[in-house]
């Protein structure tokens, strides 16, 4: 071997004249040049301990056999033995189709440009594919430095065992920030999708797993791992679903990198920069990890999951249809039984025939009038000497009299019906409270100690129907304007995830996230189908009841006109629409769940809770219920605070103080409005009137509240809301949207419990169908909440910490715990709506002046 010391030029086995030419061309300094190039034929798995300085350079030559059907991993490990150096040592690995270079000490930057140095570096060489069946390839490791003093180092090149990952076979390894690892996986025949799982027993140090295509270079350092492919941070668990269609070579690299700092995984920052150029020793950041590649589900499981989802909710359609048929048959039998003369009273018969029921007193007067007339006739005839009246003639005279009275009643009812059937186009918003009796005595009526539904159902039904239909049209408009930009935004989110490969943007349950097309977690989207289907089913049920009620009004059924809770279906239509929109927006949220779009999942939950409370209140307060405009304005304020809480509420004392004050003031104002039935004013004299009431009722004489039942409800409501306000002010929960939703749900449950208790206390009963709905709904809610609190992910933490809560699928290998929450909660909401719809069916034949208000 011939060596030429000429800068960095080395010539082997060359003729003398060529050597002289090269020296003349490349070495103008001749003997003045002192740079020595040393070449060594090196062996695998041998540690070389050498020195290097600015006046010498060492080149290690390796060769190995590369096969087309077999990939062999090669790893270069370097350790700097010298404690301090003026300049780093540069290592350049030259391969046939790639070049890898790194310096030792290796400098990696962290947050705020902090610098960490590592004296031990290990890198795996990229192995480009070869077209030949078997080929001998050379690669070279060049070692050089600009340090004037000799630097002692150790070099070792070794083959990587189990460089090719096997399906369902776990492989363990160690990694540090300066010693990353990557392994190769090849898709077997017939397998199109796999899940790559990386696990560790230690939370920290924070690490990154990446899936990259087979190409050189491989980005396996903390500062470049995010350049290509898919990646995610992890503490103890990481998982990425990989599809064959995304990798033309039918193979990919699994890259695992340990980060220089733990801040990205929710860990503390250990060091703070004292000067910009200060170097930090990161200490021991070694981490043991396990990687396993498992086959994902096939198309048959997708089909089974979709059929299961449809089957559950379509079966509820079938059950609802059967129950409706049974109820219709029972009502027909009841109607037929009442039509029999021996089984029905005259009032019930008249009601079923579409005529006004005549009171028993009126029947007695009719009989008395008939008797009087017949008696007078008999007396006159006896006086006139006409003794021909018989009992049959007396009966005929009475029948004729009753017939005339019935004709007069029919004519009166026809005139009343004509006045009730005026066109709704003549009804305007200004017509509210225009009846003279309402204007004159509503302050008296609404402040009576014992109110009946008839006292608060005095307005024209056409006016109230139009008023409550606005709820449905408003929420439909809101849904369109809200949903369209939401859909556009989540599509953008999904596109960003697919293009950048950043799996930290979305908080999926990565152990059970089944992709379909461009969607990363199709199962979480599919499970929201129940909200839409059951919302539509509820709308159909309400429509059927609305049609039956309209027909009863058309045939002048006085039971529909004068009995039971007044039927207004506008709020029911709004509730069904809100349930459908909850399903749509929850699906949009699960396209890419994170804290910035969590309001998509909760906005219509607030609306559902608010509409349910309004419906409960409307049942016995139809004349004084809130208008759609004021109700939706209040709900808009709730959503506004929800957005502020998500953006500014985390650890912000000022925000929590302001919100708690507003919460308490709103509770007091609403309590006053409900207690006085709206018969109070908020003006400059309000405080004077409050002090006057306190003085007269509490100081001058101790008198109890006039409306005890209302006072009990409002006191309980204030206790609950003040407690929730204090909890929020003290604990300051990070998930403000869920905290706000908890306030709404607690108030709704409190009002429902109060309504049912007062209903039973008033001597009313709950029919069998409503009891079944209540029990069924309570049981389903219990199971639903169990799955909800499993917490498979949480955007209150970092993405890496959230993945610690990920779990495997538990139903059909397709649905996880949160999907089951979607199934059960949609059924429970549907059942809750049915409870509101059927709870007062027992009052359909009770006069409204006998139904108490509470």
Image: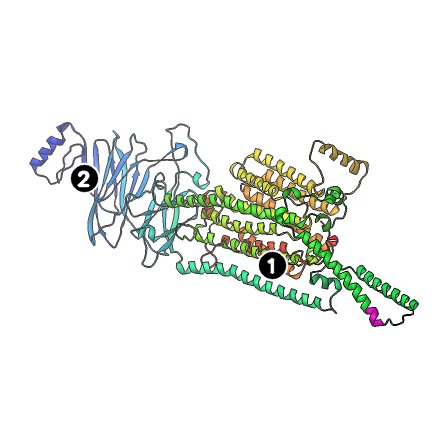
57 or 504: nearer the viewer: 504
Task: Please state if 375 lies on the left or on the right of 234 as rendered.
Answer: right
Magenta-drawn stretch, dominant element (helix, strand or loop): helix
Residue 563 appears in the rendering: no
The x, y position of residue 668, in whole percent, is 67, 39
The x, y position of residue 124, in whole percent, is 30, 45
How did the renderer colour the structure? rainbow
Residue matched to label 2 = 39
390 or 326: nearer the viewer: 390
Figure disc tally: 2
Q: Residue 392: within the magenta?
A: yes
Residue matched to label 1 = 776
- Where disc 2 sits, the SS reads strand
* Lower position in the chain sequence, tag 1 or tag 2: 2
The quadrant of the picture occupied by the N terminus is: top left
- Where disc 1 sits, the SS reads helix
Q: Is residue 201 above or below residue 305?
A: above
The x, y position of residue 764, in whole percent, is 72, 56
Task: Please state if 231 lies on the left or on the right of 822 as rendered.
Answer: left
The x, y position of residue 629, in whole percent, is 60, 42
231 or 419: nearer the viewer: 419
What residue do we see at 79% from left, 65% from top?
400
Q: Residue 492: within the magenta?
A: no
Q: Which residues are magenta?
A: 390-395
251 or 137: nearer the viewer: 251
């Amino acid at each position: 071997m011939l060596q030429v010391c000429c800068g960095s030029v080395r010539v082997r086995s060359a003729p003398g004249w060529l050597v002289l030419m090269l020296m003349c061309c490349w070495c103008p300094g001749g003997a003045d040049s002192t740079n020595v190039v040393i070449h060594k034929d090196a062996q695998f798995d041998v540690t070389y301990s050498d020195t290097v300085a600015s006046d010498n350079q060492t080149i290690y030559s390796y060769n190995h056999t590369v096969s087309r059907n077999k990939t062999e991993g090669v790893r270069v490990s370097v350790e700097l033995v010298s404690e301090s150096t003026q300049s780093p040592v540069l290592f350049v690995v030259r391969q046939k189709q790639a070049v890898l270079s790194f310096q030792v000490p290796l400098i990696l930057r962290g947050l705020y440009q902090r610098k960490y140095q590592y004296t031990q570096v290990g890198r795996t060489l990229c192995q480009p594919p070869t077209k030949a069946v078997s080929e001998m390839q050379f690669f070279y490791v060049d070692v050089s430095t600009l340090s004037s003093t000799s630097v002692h180092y150790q070099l070792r090149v070794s083959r990587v065992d189990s460089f090719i990952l096997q399906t369902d076979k776990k492989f363990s390894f160690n990694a540090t920030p300066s010693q990353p690892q990557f392994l190769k996986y090849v898709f077997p025949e017939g397998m199109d999708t796999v899940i790559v799982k990386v696990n560790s027993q230690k939370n920290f140090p924070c690490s990154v797993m990446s899936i990259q295509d087979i190409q050189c270079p491989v980005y396996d350092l903390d500062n470049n791992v995010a350049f290509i492919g898919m990646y995610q941070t992890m503490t103890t668990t990481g998982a990425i679903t990989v599809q064959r269609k995304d990798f033309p070579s039918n193979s990919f690299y699994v890259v695992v990198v340990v980060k220089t700092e733990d801040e990205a995984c929710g860990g503390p920052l250990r060091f703070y920069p004292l000067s910009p150029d200060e170097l930090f020793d990161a200490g021991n950041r070694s981490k043991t990890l396990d990687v396993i590649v498992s086959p994902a589900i096939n198309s048959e499981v997708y089909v089974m999951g979709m059929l299961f989802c449809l089957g559950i909710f379509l079966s509820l359609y079938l059950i609802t249809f059967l129950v409706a048929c049974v109820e219709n048959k029972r009502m027909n039998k009841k109607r037929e039984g009442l039509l029999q003369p021996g089984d029905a009273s005259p009032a019930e018969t008249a009601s079923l025939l579409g005529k006004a029921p005549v009171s028993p007193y009126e029947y007695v007067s009719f009989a008395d009038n008939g008797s009087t007339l017949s008696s007078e006739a008999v007396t006159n005839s006896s006086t006139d000497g006409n003794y021909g009246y018989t009992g049959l003639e007396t009966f005929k005279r009475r029948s004729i009299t009753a017939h005339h009275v019935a004709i007069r009643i029919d004519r009166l009812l026809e005139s009343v019906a004509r006045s009730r059937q005026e066109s709704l186009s003549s009804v305007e918003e200004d017509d509210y409270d225009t009846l003279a009796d309402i204007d004159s005595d509503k302050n008296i009526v609404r402040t009576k100690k014992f109110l009946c539904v008839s006292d608060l159902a005095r307005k024209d039904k056409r006016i109230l129907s139009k008023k409550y239909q606005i709820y449905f049209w408003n929420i439909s408009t809101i849904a369109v304007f809200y949903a369209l930009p939401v859909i556009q935004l989540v599509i953008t989110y999904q596109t960003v995830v697919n293009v950048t490969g950043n799996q930290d943007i979305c908080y999926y349950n990565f152990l059970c996230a089944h992709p379909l097309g461009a969607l990363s977690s199709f199962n979480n989207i599919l499970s929201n189908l129940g909200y839409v289907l059951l919302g539509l089913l509820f709308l159909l049920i309400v429509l059927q009841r609305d049609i039956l009620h309209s027909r009863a009004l058309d045939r002048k059924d006085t039971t529909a006109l004068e009995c039971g809770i007044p039927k207004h279906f506008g709020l029911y239509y709004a509730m069904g629409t809100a349930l459908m929109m909850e399903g749509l927006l929850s699906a949009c949220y699960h396209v890419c769940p994170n804290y910035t779009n969590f309001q998509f999942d909760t906005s219509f939950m607030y609306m559902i809770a608010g509409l349910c409370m309004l419906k409960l209140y409307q049942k016995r307060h139809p004349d004084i219920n809130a208008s759609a405009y004021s109700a939706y304005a209040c709900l808009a304020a709730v959503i506004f605070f929800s957005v502020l809480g998500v953006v500014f509420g985390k650890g912000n004392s000022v925000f929590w103080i302001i919100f708690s004050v507003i919460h308490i003031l709103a509770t007091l104002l609403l309590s006053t409005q409900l207690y006085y039935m709206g018969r109070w004013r908020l003006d400059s004299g309000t405080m004077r009137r409050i002090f006057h009431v306190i003085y007269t009722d509490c100081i001058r004489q101790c008198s109890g509240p006039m409306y005890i039942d209302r006072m009990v409800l409002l006191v309980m409501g204030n206790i609950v809301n003040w407690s929730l306000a204090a909890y929020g002010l003290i604990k300051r929960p990070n998930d403000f949207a869920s905290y706000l939703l908890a306030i709404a749900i607690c108030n709704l449950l409190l009002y429902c419990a109060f309504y049912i208790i007062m209903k039973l206390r008033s001597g009313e009963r709950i029919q069998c169908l409503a009891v079944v709905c209540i029990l069924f709904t309570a049981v389903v809610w219990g199971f639903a909440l169990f799955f909800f609190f499993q917490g498979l992910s949480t955007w209150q933490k970092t993405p890496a910490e959230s993945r610690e809560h990920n779990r495997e699928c538990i139903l059909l290998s397709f649905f996880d715990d949160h999907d089951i929450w979607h199934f059960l909660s949609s059924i429970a909401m549907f059942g809750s709506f049915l409870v509101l719809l059927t709870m007062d069916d027992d009052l359909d034949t009770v006069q409204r002046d006998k139904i108490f208000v509470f």
